[in-house]
Image: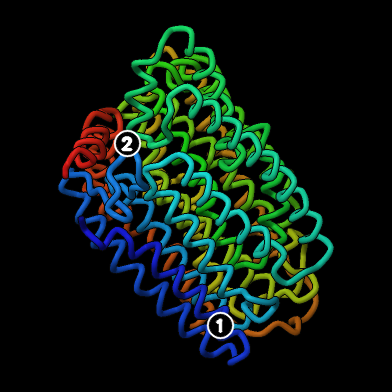
Amino acid sequence: MNHLLTIPLLLPAAAAMLNLLLADRGHGLQRLISLSAAAALLPVAILLLDLAGSGAFQVYQLGNWPAPFGIVLVLDRLSALLLLITAVVALFALLYACNDDDLRGRDFHVLFQLLLLGVNGAFLTGDLFNLFVFFEILLIASYCLSLHGSGPKRTRAGLHYVVLNLIGSSMFLIAVGILYAVAGTLNMADLAVKVAAGAPEQATLVRVSALLLLVVFGLKAAILPLHLWLPSLYANGVAPVAALFAILTKVGLYAILRTATLIFGANGPESILAGTWLPALALLTLAAGAVGMIGSDRLCRLIAYLVVVSSGTLLAGIAQFSVAGITAALYYLPHTTLVTAGLFLLADLIARQRGRTGDHLSPGPPLEQPTRLGVLFFLGAVAAAGLPPLSGFIGKVLLLQAVAPADAVWLWIVVLAGSWAGLITLSRAGSRLFWKTEGGRSAGFPAGLPRLAPAAVLLGLSVVMTVFAAPITRYAEATAIQLLQPQGYIAAVLDRGKQP
């Protein structure tokens, strides 16, 4: 067994415990521990990506208990990709937070690391019940982080978020209970075998559990009509928290993709929804996000609706359950996560220099650093709107090329209309923030390198993804092929379980 698989869990868990024990020793030590843990996660994630790049599955049996009786961690191309994206976003969000945003509430660094533990665990676990456990860890941490900095707007948005996810957690448990009653196991590889060989009279229960899981994961992914919690929560959150939350919707989409291709196969969302509900939900989510962008009166709310648009776009690729569709989604996924995270940080920089006007899309005082912030905003707007030549354009071209001719008309119309809406709203936002100014300069202060650098790097990674589009696409295509051939995953987990 390769013990490297445990590092993405042990590092944030250890950092959270140390920060909790050292809560009274000052913020400097907590920052050092958190930054060290987040920085160490990045090379670990790169090593795991290289390890998964060979195409072999890495299985780690906790306590050396064989599957399906024990808990297993499984690394494949998909989980390795998402671990790397999480590590990148977390590091730069934390660097930004250490410019005093972490002092706006209690136990920020403890909660930050616990959220990383939950996210990384969700990507690595090979057990459906432990997927629920890691979901709860990241949700509890996100409940507290959403309230970081306090305020009535954050409290109201956080309350909606908590209530909806408590309902979702209850539905998750019900779905898990049904599957356990049917199959007698919750190991995902073993479930795939048991569900495929299940008796015909059990098919209805399997479908009910599949639909319940789809609702739960759709809530996490902010799919219409379960997306209403997201705009207010992200728009009112502290900037580094909103940037880190850019990865949370991807956890829901990951769970949909993993369970549909591995556990259920012919009995789950792939067959029930691929031709009807799921593609339609994807396009409706994308359209709802576009309408929300047009009606946004704040930059942060506009970016939050960009997250909704990205969920619809990613689901449109996943819902095709084809190599080309999933490849397009997996190329677009890191692009949209990095760009939206960077835009949340940039929006905070702009709001700080506009004084009381903040990020409202109305005339305000001129910025202290219009050139630097304007260049970054232009870069982010081009990438987010999907304009050439940046990575957003490549991802959408891959998606449009992947769609079957019968579905091409609707998907082309909605995707291109969403891009048009993004172009219009981001152009309008830019003109009001940078050109339509009034009065003298506000009391805002210029952003130094510690604040500018994280936003610049996250947005600049869109350029990197454009330069290295060919190898990234090849990796995404290999990942899609691996997902659509789940026999390798099943054999790696269960065959290892048979070893003495």
Where is residue 99? Give x, y as percent.
58, 82
Camera-side mark, 2 or 1 = 1
In this picture, residue 318 sits left or right of residue 47: right
The one nearer the camera, 161 or 67, is 67
The one nearer the camera, 284 or 190, is 190
The answer to whether 223 is drawn above or below residue 32 in the figure is: above
Instruction: Name which residue type carries label 2.
Output: Thr
Q: Residue furthest front?
A: 500
- Closer to the chain start, of discs 2 and 1, is 1
Q: Which residue is drawn at 53% across and 75% down?
A: 96
Q: Which residue is drawn at 58% across and 47% down?
A: 306
Bin the neighbour count of mark 2 within 10 Å (Cα to Cα): few under 14, some 14-19, many 20 and up. Answer: many
| Residue tagged 2 | 327
Q: Which residue is drawn at 68% across and 37% down?
A: 291
| Residue tagged 1 | 21
Instruction: Name which residue type carries label 1.
Output: Leu
Where is residue 494? Give x, y as percent.
25, 36
